[in-house]
Each structure stands twice: as C-alpha cells, then as structure tokens.
C-alpha cells in the first residue's frame, strides 16, 4: 500500500491483471465516493435502467411526406400543409372504429399502453391522440371518454411480445414458432356464416339448397357490427393490419383487419400480402374491413342467430364482422369468399386450387378436396410454387391471392413434408398443437387440444342416394400459418403465365375411376362443378365403406355465385389459352376401400410428371364405360394394367355394380345444377350433362 493510502501498483508489469485485463483501482482517500470502479469500458449515456432500455430500440417511423388528399390540410395562407403520418393514420383508424349510432368513437391512440413514450421530453402514454372541445349530448358514451390504443401493422417480433405477455396459451416453441390456442372453436363454423341479402345480392348470389350463403338482413348485420365495435372500443388496445390481397398489382384489393388478439394479427400478417413501408404510406381507404371481436359472443336472441357464433359479410358496406369464434381461419376464408364475389365482376376467375410452374414457364392448377393429395402433388422441388390454396386467373395470367400458406400439421414429419417442417420457425403461427412443457418441442401426433370438436361443412354428402349435410370433425385441424417465402422454391412475386394443365384430383375409395383420364372441355366443366372425392366412413363392428362427397368447384363452402358461372369462366379461359383438363384418381385400385389397394404415390407422381412434360398428350387412348373417360394405354414408370380399372378387379360383377353406383351418385348430385342456364341458351348445359355418366 502507498503512503497516501491508495491501492496502486508502481510497476508497469503489475498494471494489468490476469489475462491482460485492467486492474480495478480502489482509492481509500476519496471519502466522497468510496467505490470501486472499472474504467475499462466506455461509459453509457443512460443514467437509469429505464433510460438504458429506451436506448435499446430505435424508432423507425416513416418520415416521407404524404401527398395524398387524406394527408393534407389547408394552412392559414391557403396553401396545403403536410400533416404527419401518425395523424393520417389516426384519422383513418378513428373512422374505422367509430360507432354508427354515436357521433364519436374512442380517442384513438397509437402504441402499447404498457410502453410509455416521451413527448417534448416528458413521459407520455400516448404517441398521438385526438382532442376536441368537451361537449355533452345524448350521443356521448363511455367509449368516447376513453383512449383506445391502436397497435398498427406490428412486426412479428412485436406481436410475439404481445402474445406471450398478454395472451394465455401463447408460447414460443423450440423451432421458434409461436404456439397459440383458438379457443373452443378449432375449425370454421359454416352454419354460422351469413351474408346480407339485399336487392343486389338476391339477384347475384347463389341461394338455396347446396349454397353456403345463409341470408341475414341489413338491420341484423348492423346490430352485430355495433356489438363487435363496442367490444373492440371497450379494450385498452386493438391490433390493426392494413394489407393486400392478390399479387397481380392491377387487381389488388386493400384490406383492413381490426382484431383484439396478437395471434390474429400475426396470422393475417402471414396470410395476406405484406405492404412495403412506401405502400403503407399511400394505403388510403381500405376496400374491405374485418372487425374480429371473436372473443365476444353474439346475442342469441338477435334475429337469424342460431348460436353464440356469427360470421357476417355485408358486400354493400364492404365489411365483415366476427363474433363468438377465435378460429383465425374464418378471416382467411371470409376474404376468399369476398374474392369469389369481386373477381368475377372483373372477368377474373377465382379458384380454390394449388398452383406451380415449371422452369420453362408451364403452369399447372391443382384442384382437390382434403385427402386427395393437392398439397403434396403441387409441392414439387423441380417446380416453382406460386401458391398452395387460393388463386386468380385473369387476362394477365395466374396470381396468388395470399401472401402465405396455411398447412395442416397433424402427423407432420421432416421426412414426409420437409418444406412445411422447415417453414415452422420464427414468425410462424402454430394453432392448437401440443408441445413438451420443458423442451417446447412440438408433438405433431398429439391432437388432444382439438379432439372431438365438430364443425358442419357445406359439402354434399350423399348416402343412400339422398342429399344431406353431414358433420365433419375438426379433431385433427392443427395448423401452421407462415409467409410463402418460407418455402425455398416459392416464386416471388407469386404470379405466372396462363395455365397449361388443369388437374382435378379425386381420392376415389370406390376404386372404379382410372388413375388418370384426359378430359374434354365439357367433361372438365362437369367434374369441376361436381367436385368429387370419397371419404372412408367410421368403423362400426369392423365394417368400413366409402362414402361419396361432392363440393362444387372443389370449394363449395367459399363460393358466392352459382357454381355453373365459375365453370363457364373456366371453360372460356381454357379454350382461349389452350389448357388441357385431367382427372387424376389418387384413391383405390383393384377394388373399393377394404379390398383394393391405394394407388402408390410414386405412380401418381409419374403421371403428374407426364402431364407436365406434355408426353401424356401424345399417348394412345381408350374410352371407359359409363363415365366415358379417355385413359392412356401406357405411361412410362406406371404399370399398364392399372391404367384401366376393369383390369384390376377380380370380380367383374362387383366392379360393374360399383361403377353404376358411383355414376348414380354423380347424377343425383348434379340434379341441383340442371335447371341453371349457362350462356345465352341451354345448349352448353345440355353438353355438360352429356359429359357426365351415361347409362
């Protein structure tokens, strides 16, 4: 120790500690501080831990001046004054949340109420707010006296924070994906989905037997809208997404989603097309708005209500209201229904299909119900993925409606679906899955969360030759929602030229349809309108029988117009652009389910490859009885004997009986479309009927 009482080391060799680190100097004579200090690090600016945290995040608010009419006001000298981006957003969001029956909505505030910000150096809870001279009248309400914080177009990282902190059941899994719960509903509620029937929609939409459109009146919609908006206004904060539908910029639709959950906001962030910061600045007024108040039930005593759930679309008001269900898929499919209405008005065909493109620019569309292999066959490492579910076909070619994928993940494995497996990472939403409480590893085999929850699916379910609606289970509806760019071979932007091949997939559990058939234009329309596949019934005393299912246009639950209108548009575009129709059976051969065998996936892939390459067009063909389908006599890599179903059955009588049974089911299903006029006369209708089974 030195004489002055300081701890010091006069030797230069002792001026550093172990491993070359600076020595800590202690000064005993400094009576004011009496502290040890380390001068080896650069001092930080923050004086408190809160200030340190404030330095962690830098602001990225757009500073570009806004030139749109909504962003300008008139200055005192008569010139146009540029207002801030935050003020422009506040004005628009305030309009979205305003009540229809009261003059004032809530005071709109941007930002998280739990994150104070400084304004002019002083702490402030609000990043912007709406002030006016206080007045008192009959229209004032509690909601007009409060602030509603708007979390606007948050990033996935911000939405993760909101979900994990405030939403019970939200966790980060080992892969980085966000695990969430959709509440009591783990699937869509088609029986609770309604459309306002007015003079226009009564004339334009598909109503009646087989239609997914259940009517409601304007007044009831406004009652539910008010209930949803009141609920959203009662919250401390709401999430708002401004995004796009349709990758074709010429036919893009602007949508706004107002929701109460970070889960819903992140889901739509992934599923819709994400705008750039420049596009967001010029976003303007949305073309359609969703009010998702799914945590709050509808009033069951309200006219037209049959449960505590209601999903309501008002095409005239360009709005959708969700009450009583937190299942995020309602938003996705609600917007798809909107596109099924808007796009045909522009002579654009909206399609429930997968779509991929070869390296030479040849595009194929894949149609098929659940279990037909649509996702598996449209996902091909040798081809670019344009989209997995929803598309438009315009004069410009094909375009994906969405910006993401919504994949089933029950029984998912890296070996079976490597692309989907690898897409489940940070930013992905995992719905209703089960994970290890310690490692957070997901068990994709476990369906405990969704077991035994039923939904009613609006597809034709035929048994004993009668039309009936049947319940389908949502017990295995665990899902992953992720941006399409998470798929390595996704084509960005998601657009392509006119399709070359139209592939209709059917899993025929009756075992009488050939593995592949080349279709005429009329046959393509007939099978497109039919939308056939077959399901395997539940086990009863060890007996299993196939059951036919028909879903018009391979997506009856979402279409708005009569199926024949979409079929006529499909035929017109196929004829104009020279596309070929194909019917591919991914189901059984050599007998029905229980006696025959499932057609090997390797054989089906060879068939699809032959369609893509064009070699199948050059094959020799023969015609089948009853359905009159043209089947090739030879395909490379596929046993010739399985190409004709008649060759694979050992019992010829059983084959013919089963073939006639399926043909009868097709005829019964098509009776609902016979009387609908297609084109200027009934000639096309007659031609389509003639393309069906004849016996």
Image (tube, rainbow, N blue to C red):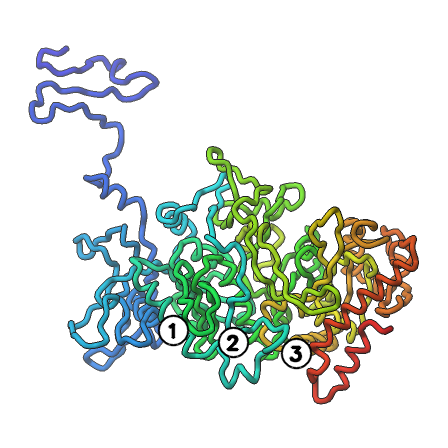
Q: Real-space Cα distance between discs 3 and 1?
A: 33 Å
Q: Real-space Cα distance between discs 2 and 1?
A: 15 Å
Which mark, by number, is residue 256?
Answer: none
Q: Nearer the viewer, residue 428 or 103?
A: 103
Does label 2 or label 3 sit earlier along the sequence? Answer: 2
Per the image, the residue denoted by label 2 is: 215
Per the image, the residue denoted by label 1 is: 223
Instruction: Give the residue furthest to the front.
Output: 541
Which mark, by number, is residue 565?
Answer: 3
Is label 1 in a helix, a strand or a loop? helix
Residue 554 picture location, percent across and down? 67, 66
Q: Quadrant of residue 507?
A: bottom right
Residue drawn where x is 44% and y is 63% of the image: 308
Does label 2 or label 1 sit earlier along the sequence? Answer: 2
Q: Nearer the viewer, mark 3 or mark 1?
A: 1
Label 3 environment density (alpha carbons within 10 Å; few <14, some 14–19, many ≥20):
some
Label 1 environment density (alpha carbons within 10 Å; few <14, some 14–19, many ≥20):
some
């Amino acid at each position: 120790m030195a004489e002055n009482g300081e701890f010091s080391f006069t030797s230069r060799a002792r001026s550093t500690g172990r491993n070359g680190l600076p020595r800590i100097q202690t000064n005993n004579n400094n009576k004011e501080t009496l502290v040890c200090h380390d001068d080896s690090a650069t001092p930080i600016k923050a004086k408190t831990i809160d200030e340190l945290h404030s330095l962690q995040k830098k602001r990225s608010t757009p500073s570009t001046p806004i030139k749109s009419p909504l962003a300008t006001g008139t200055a005192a000298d008569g010139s146009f004054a540029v207002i801030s981006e935050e003020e422009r957003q506040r004005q628009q969001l305030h309009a979205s949340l305003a009540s229809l029956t009261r003059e004032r909505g809530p005071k709109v505030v941007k930002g998280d109420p739990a994150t104070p910000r400084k304004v002019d150096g002083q702490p402030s809870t609000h990043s912007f707010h709406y002030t006016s001279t206080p007045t008192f009248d009959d229209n004032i309400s509690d909601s007009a006296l409060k602030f509603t914080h708007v979390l606007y177009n948050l990033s996935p990282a911000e939405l993760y924070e909101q979900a994990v902190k405030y939403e019970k059941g939200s966790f980060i899994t080992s892969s980085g994906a966000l695990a969430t719960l959709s509440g009591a509903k783990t699937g869509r509620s088609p029986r609770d989905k309604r459309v306002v029937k007015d003079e226009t929609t009564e004339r334009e939409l598909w109503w009646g037997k087989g239609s997914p459109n259940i009517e409601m009146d304007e007044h009831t919609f406004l009652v539910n809208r008010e209930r949803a908006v009141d609920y959203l206004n009662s919250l401390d904060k709401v999430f708002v997404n401004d995004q796009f539908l349709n990758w074709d910029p010429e036919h893009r639709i602007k949508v706004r989603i107002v929701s109460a959950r970070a889960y819903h906001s992140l889901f739509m962030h992934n599923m819709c097309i994400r705008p750039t910061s420049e596009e967001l600045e010029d976003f303007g007024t949305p073309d359609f708005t969703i009010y998702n108040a799914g945590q709050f039930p509808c009033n069951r005593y309200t006219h037209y209500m049959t449960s505590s759930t209601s999903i309501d679309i008002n095409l005239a008001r360009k709005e959708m209201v969700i009450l009583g269900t937190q299942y995020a898929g309602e938003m996705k499919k609600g917007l798809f229904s909107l596109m099924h209405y808007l796009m045909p008005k522009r002579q654009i065909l909206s399609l429930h299909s997968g779509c991929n493109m070869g390296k030479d620019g040849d595009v194929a569309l894949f149609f098929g119900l659940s279990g037909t292999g649509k996702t598996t066959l449209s996902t091909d490492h040798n081809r670019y993925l344009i989209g997995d579910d929803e598309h438009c076909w315009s004069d410009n070619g094909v375009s994906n409606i969405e910006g993401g994928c919504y994949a089933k993940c029950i029984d998912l494995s890296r070996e079976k679906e490597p692309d989907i497996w690898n897409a489940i990472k940070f930013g992905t939403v995992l719905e209703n899955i089960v994970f290890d409480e310690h490692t957070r590893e997901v068990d994709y085999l476990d369906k405990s969360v969704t077991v035994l929850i039923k939904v009613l699916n609006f597809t034709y379910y035929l048994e004993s030759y009668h039309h009936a609606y049947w319940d389908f289970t949502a017990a295995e509806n665990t899902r992953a929602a992720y941006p399409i760019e998470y798929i390595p071979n996704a084509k960005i932007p998601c657009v392509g030229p006119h399709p070359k091949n139209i592939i209709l997939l059917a899993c025929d559990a009756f075992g009488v349809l050939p593995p592949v058939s080349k279709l005429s234009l009329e046959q393509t329309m007939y099978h497109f309108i039919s939308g056939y596949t077959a399901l395997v019934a539940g086990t009863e005393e060890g007996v299993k029988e196939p059951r036919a299912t028909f879903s018009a246009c391979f997506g009856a639950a979402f279409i708005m117009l009569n199926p024949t209108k979409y079929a006529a548009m499909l035929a017109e575009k196929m004829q104009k652009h020279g596309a070929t129709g194909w019917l591919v059976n991914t189901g059984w051969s050599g007998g029905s389910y229980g006696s025959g065998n499932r057609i090997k996936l390797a054989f089906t892939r060879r068939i699809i490859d032959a369609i893509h390459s064009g070699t199948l067009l050059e094959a020799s063909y023969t015609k089948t009885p009853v359905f009159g389908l043209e089947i090739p006599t030879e395909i490379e890599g596929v046993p010739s004997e399985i190409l004709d179903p008649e060759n694979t059955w050992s019992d010829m009588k059983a084959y013919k009986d089963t073939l006639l049974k399926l043909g009868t089911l097709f005829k019964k299903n098509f009776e609902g479309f016979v009387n609908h006029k297609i084109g200027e006369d009934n000639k096309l209708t007659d031609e389509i009927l003639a393309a069906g089974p004849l016996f």
